Amino acid sequence: MHLQQKLQVSQKGYPHMNLTDLSVEQKCTKAYELIYAGQYEAAKEVLGRLWRGIGETPALDYPPEIAAEVLLVCGSLTGWLGSSKQIDAQEKAKDLLTQALNLFQSLGNREKVSEVQYELGICYWRLGAFDEARIVFNEALEGAREVGKVLITRTTVEISTGHYHEAWRMLDEARSSFDESNHALKGRWHAQMALVLRRLAQAENKIEYFDRAIVEYTAAIYHYEEAGHVRYCATNLNNIAFLLYKLGHYTEAHEHLDRAHKFLERLKDIGLLAQVDETRARVLLAEKKYKEARRVIIGVVDTLSRGGERALLADALTIKAIAQARLGDYEYSIMTFRFATEVAEKAGAKTNAAQAAISMIEEHRARLSEYELFNLYNRADKWLSDTQDAEHLARLRFCARIVTQKLFGKQFGDPLFSLQDVVAKYEARFIEEALQESKGKVTQAAKLLGITHQSLASKLRSRHKHLLKKRRPVHKRKRKRKQ
């Protein structure tokens, strides 16, 4: 059956099924299968009254083993629908899943405990809490019936944290176990291997990895078509478009994005549509179509701001900040970069935070002070302390050169060298750092610098007027009236 026809079938739901004949347990099993296939609306239809809405606790007047099943499927569907519709629902999904976990643990059902941990791991990953996701996935592997499914998704954490060779090793070791698997699982394996190759191609600058990744994505689309998983076919069209963009084939990239966009619009998957538009914004930036890129990415940021996937939001904010910088909106660009690093850091998405900081240095090296540049570099270096991504490290080294040049400025032998200018530059740097440390209080900053309040105030008014905005507003003291 053609992909377009399968899309139409998936949208129609299951009118041929007599849902009233299904027990609660059967409804949960069928709904969970549909969630795995990316057919969230059909899963809601099958659940019927069991589903009260995203994040809502279902009726639990059933025996513990059935109540736990209901919580599992409702928690899973909350997480996936929250991501699809970009509703901030991951914490609610975690709450429902944790209730299911506690029930299954009390019943001693290790297989079901693993199933819940798998879904919890995905929630943590969506929130950017990669360390927690890794722990939960590892626990899920211990009692999993479908080890392959857990293992594939587990590698997403390693990819997100820049451990590409580790992800490749894990997938390669599991390769033989997928030979007899169904099309859905084979599709996932090929898609994940493609993602690893894509990241390695960027990290190690090996074009051949891009070609291999395209082959793997194409294989994934074939298996997803056979399995009827239309949503994942669209996702991988987006992934191929990203590779084509990296190879400089912008026209072909747009064509793949158009196809993916068409399918996802009909599926009404707002979350994945945002990811497709984010890729398009990257392509437009590469084409130097900065106004179009800004227009597209503003919509992406607006969508992702309503959801809970903070790592994705941080990436979109970074792209928006780059577009703003290239259009000359420097003040807004710097504000957006700062927000991107804040969002990623709070989520625990260290790699995403580092990318925002590095991009900010690259785009605003001439506009940021020595203190700001050094602080950004230090934070990025800390966030990338355990990365294996050579591209990230190369960009970090480039930023180190920018910061060093900014800190030390012109050297002896330079015809424009001036001792007075160098001294003033260093003085400004330490004054700015002291004002930052004292939160703008001139008296405290002066103490840190070992000078008087009057001396620092004089320097700010005369030699360093650009730092006046860093101090707190001056409050004139009222003169006492003479009696």
Image (cartoon, rainbow, N blue to C red):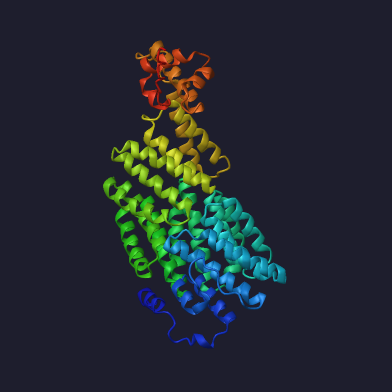
Residue at position x 54%, y 56% in the image: 125
Name the residue at the front extreme. Answer: 483
Question: With 130 as the anchor, is 332 left or right in this view?
Answer: left
Residue nearest the observer in this picture, 157 or 370: 370
Q: Is residue 61 visible?
A: yes
Residue placed most toward the observer, 286 or 329: 329
Is residue 483 rendered to the left or right of residue 22? Answer: left
Residue 133: % across, % down = 59, 55
How far across and how far down the image is residue 58, in percent? Answer: 55, 72
396 relative to 403, above or below = below
* Res 175 visible: no
Is 252 drawn above or below residue 325 in the view shown? Answer: below
Which quarter of the picture shows residue 470?
A: top left
Quadrant of the drawing holding the N terminus: bottom left
Q: In the rendered picture of this protein, how many numbered marks are placed on residues?
A: 0
| Residue drawn at x 45%, y 45% as measured from the top left | 205
Of residues 227 and 217, the one drawn nearer to the viewer in this rendering: 227
Query: Who's the residue at 34% across and 60% down the image?
Result: 257
Q: Position of residue 134 (x, y in %)?
A: 61, 55
